[in-house]
Amino acid sequence: MAGAPVAKTPHFALHRVALDAAREGRPLFPVADAWLGVLLPKRWARRAVTRNAIRRQIYEASRERAAALPQAALVVRLRTEFSRKQFVSATSDVLKRAVRAELDQLLDRACTGRSDAASRPRASLAAMPAPAPTEPPHAV
């Protein structure tokens, strides 16, 4: 994906492209709305049944937030696998709940416009120690 993700969770990343990004003088999409794409590599979800279950969860979670999503092209990408030791069944309710919880976090960040960088705590300048004074270079 070109550009850094705008939001991340342990298993997902969300990428966004503005709709005004024209290509060859034409708009990217014909209608200004939230457009959603899903990228689920076989590397991270081997079974088709697992990929389909995750895909359904992504589309359902985004459908519930359709009005709040920004007008942009959004791509949800699976970036690591869900442990097959922890989630034995490819379509278990436990896996679906775990996927849904992460997607809720991811899409809430997209709806509020808060990126991962903005959500991390920052050290205030007042709390940072002052730099040590440096000596001027000696003339030779």
Image (cartoon, grey):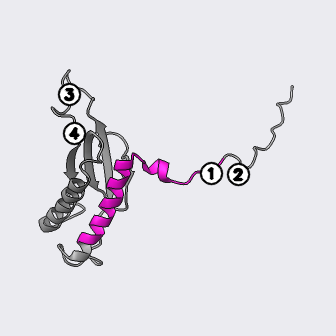
Is 20 drawn above or below residue 1 in the view shown? above
Does residue 40 appear in this view? no
Q: Amino acid at mark 2?
A: Ala
Q: Position of residue 104 (x, y in %)?
A: 32, 60
**Could you tell me how far apart the alpha carbons at marks 2 and 4 are, in whole angstroms?**
43 Å
For the point 27% across and 29% down, the residue is: 20
Numbered tag placed on residue 127 in the rendering: 2
Residue type at numbered disc 3? Pro
Where's the C terminus, which quadrant? top right
Does the CB distance between marks 1 and 2 fall below 8 Å?
yes
- Position of residue 4 relative to residue 47, above or below, is above
In what element is the residue under mark 2? loop
Residue 50: mark: none
Quadrant of image for the N terminus: top left
| SS class, disc 1 | loop
Q: Earlier in the sequence, mark 3 or mark 1?
A: 3
Identity, as a three-letter code, of the amino acid under mark 1 = Ala
**Circle nearer the N terminus (3, 4):** 3
| Region of the chain picked out in magenta, as a range | 96-124
Q: Which residue is mark 1?
A: 123
Q: Secondary structure at mark 3?
A: loop
Q: Which mark is residue 33?
A: 4
**Residue at mark 3:** 27
